[in-house]
Amino acid sequence: MTQTRKNYVRPLDLKHGQVDMAHGSGGRAMAQLIEELFAKHLGNEYLAQGDDGALLPAPGQGRLVMATDCHVVSPLFFPGGDIGCLSVHGTINDVAMMGAIPLYLAAGFILEEGFKLADLARIVRSMAAAAKEAGVPIVTGDTKVVERGKGDGVFITTTGIGVVAPGNELSGRCAQAGDAILVSGTLGDHGMAIMAVRESLGFESPIISDTAALHSLIAAMRASGADIHVLRDPTRGGLATTLNEIAGQSQVGMMLQEKALPVNPAVNAACEFLGLDPLYVANEGKLVAICAAADAEKLLAAMRAHPLGTNAAIIGSVHADDHHFVQMTTGFGGKRIVDWLSGEQLPRIC
Amino acid sequence: MKYIDEFRDGEVAVGLAEAIRREARPARRYHFMEFCGGHTHAISRYGVSDLLPDNVKMIHGPGCPVCVLPIGRVDQAIRLALEQGVTLCTYGDCLRVPASDGLSLLKAKARGGDIRMVYSSADAVALAQKHPDKQVVFFAIGFETTTPPTAVAIKQAAALGLKNFSVLCCHVLTPSAISSILESPEVRQWGTVPLDGFIGPAHVSTIIGSRPYEFFAEEYRKPVVIAGFEPLDVMQAIRMLIRQVNEGRAEVENEFSRAVDRNGNLKAQALVGEVFEMRKHFEWRGLNVLPYSALRIRRQFAEFDAEKRFPLDYRPVPDHKACECGAILRGVRRPQDCKLFGSVCTPENPVGSCMVSSEGACAAHYTYGRYKDV
Amino acid sequence: MCLAIPAQIVEMRDNDNALVDLAGVRKEISLALVSDVAVGDYVIVHVGYALNKLDPEEAAKTLALFAELGQLNDDTPTVH
């Protein structure tokens, strides 16, 4: 049986090749990139349709949730993950935090001229694995190429759609005085994993990013029957920023117990070296849950029973406060405010 | 973490708080200045003030090198990057300090300046080695703790024969700052700043030892207790200060005996003496020009002096008229007393130096203690 | 000012450097400012340099002082 020669097209050189402007120009080179790299790894019935958009079934009951995330992380590859799986997890989480079941993802790539195809392949394979493990396919996408110097290797934007059943909607506006505040695990892992490998800082550390899709954890939490009011993932700006956002939205105050915060000893140590506060360091595989006080223990048990929630903890409570302050009783006994971050947290010497 | 966690133990704190309460005479008020920004930070971050009795108050001092760094010096660093095209290496602390023309080092970077954050002066030397075609300048700030690392870097550059490495030296001296506070009219003549004693800096003292503070204790009759940076260290030091005041003593005591002795680190002192000498005058933000308060690079190492290699005159820049940083640095006013605090001047838009660094009195109060005012 | 932390030397390296460890996080730092340090010693680390060796006996003494209940005429604290 003869194999049809594919029109004398040389396969992509994934070992030594680089992205060039032709890959973004809509011509044969781009089609090849899509076929041999993207579609090959991300392949599913929707992508296979080969159209500019994906034709999806309409949801039955409930409402749609849509979320989008742009990813510009540097370095692209870090201990525990890469920009690829990060972009899949991040958007799945955004959709899931609204109370929705994530269903489909779209992915847009802005590639810099000169970016190594080997690295791109690695990223795409990672996205494929993450999407497969999460059970959420990437059904449509786009690629553009910018000139050398105008990008940072690759930028990825992912958009996700999910469906939330009536009554399951969650919002940052729903925290109430008396509610319990829980967190699903150790804080600051992702941010410190990145910080530790940034060239100029030269730390050797066992810290790995916690990047993960949390929708199955959330399903387990729902199944416990606990009365959950708010879910959010504390990404950029860390737990402190997320809690301040929620406090502002819900118009309440919060009181945390520093002793209850789960933090990896290595993360603490890395923060000590650099003068950083783990409360403000990014997480990519953790969530904050605010629930009715009576259900706190039940919810905690459900979280701890799930592999992504083994270090879950009750860390504080919500109370009425016109100033919407997030405060904390320190491990030392005194009180402090846990305020908004001003700009990015930078390592300091003083 | 060993030698850290034990010194943050909340249960021991309860006992110490009780001991302080018993030793502080109820009829008397105690005011102590913690000189060092690291102590200000520890007090705020752990809520130490909550554990002190009402008659014991802490005043924040000027020991924050970023807070006392004049705008004119940041301007020099920015000019080096934008006008001279150098690769400017700086510690993270300086990146957001607002300078002239609405710039900061971070903003200058956005404008195309090659500005890099480094963790160590050694990184700057390594960068110069790696890129012989670039002129690398290290923006050296800090008190006596941070000066020896700069000295080592300069000697290393000399040993390597580097032709493209220099240092913009803005190192300042602790005793001068303490003097300026003790000499201020509010303290010396008018007594409007009641100052009963100092908590001496921790890591500066590992280098200079406890001896330099003996002068202040004797001359000004104020006790000094050198304290480690952990909250239990600070509380113990406060207890020791209260005891000295009660007993009418004015001595130098060392709570941080695990890392500080009377003589300090002689090897580091020798290295500093080899590379640097005192400047006759230096402008401090908030404290004006102080004599013999800062360092410059010696003639033998002139080729590593950025102020000699590049055309860099120093242009002083006055602070905003309503900014109370000077008074706050001297302990005469509190952040809440400044009209700009929290309205115009915030950590996002710092007007004065006390808000710029996370250890500055205003930043610390805004970030950690503001809720107590409302 | 001067953010510095006590870390343990776990390995000596070339060029007067050493590898220090704090709860599993490791960094190579310079020993140019200290002398007579060995693997196992704790040093105070600031901006990539060891400033001083930490004295474990003094540390223990200080911790003991914290725990003293203390009366007005207590033991005289360390005076230098």
Image (spheres, rainbow, N blue to C red):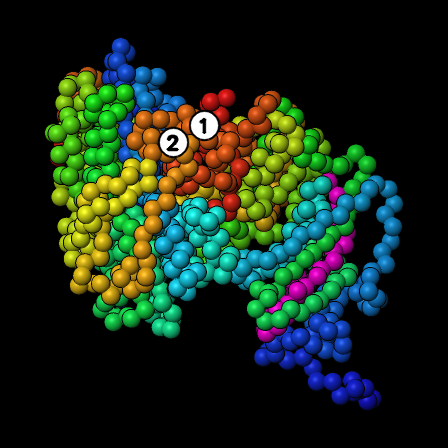
Q: Give the side of residue B279 with respect to residue A19, left or right.
A: left
Residue C73, image x, y percentages: 16, 18
The residue under label 2 is: B324
Q: Is residue A115 magenta?
A: yes
Q: Name the image quarter holding the N terminus of chain B.
A: top left
Residue B13, image x, y percentages: 34, 26
Q: Residue type at mark 2: give it.
A: Glu
- The part of the chain drawn in magenta is A99-128
Q: Give the side of residue A225 with respect to residue A155, left or right.
A: right
Q: Residue type at mark 1: give it.
A: Lys
Q: Which quadrant holds residue A54?
A: bottom right
Q: Between disc 2 and disc 1, whose residue precedes?
A: 2
For mark 2, give the secondary structure: loop
Mark 2: give few (<14), some (14-19) or many (20+) Cα within 10 Å. many
- Chain letter of disc 2 in the image: B
Judge whether residue C57 can be spotted in this image.
no
- A136, A298: nearer the viewer: A136
Q: Which quadrant holds residue C78?
A: top left
For mark 1, give the secondary structure: loop
The residue under label 1 is: B339
- B197, A280: nearer the viewer: B197
Mark 1: give few (<14), some (14-19) or many (20+) Cα within 10 Å. few
Against B340, is B151 above or below?
Answer: below
Which residue is located at x 50 percent, y 34 percent?
A: B344
Residue at the top extreme, as displayed: B27
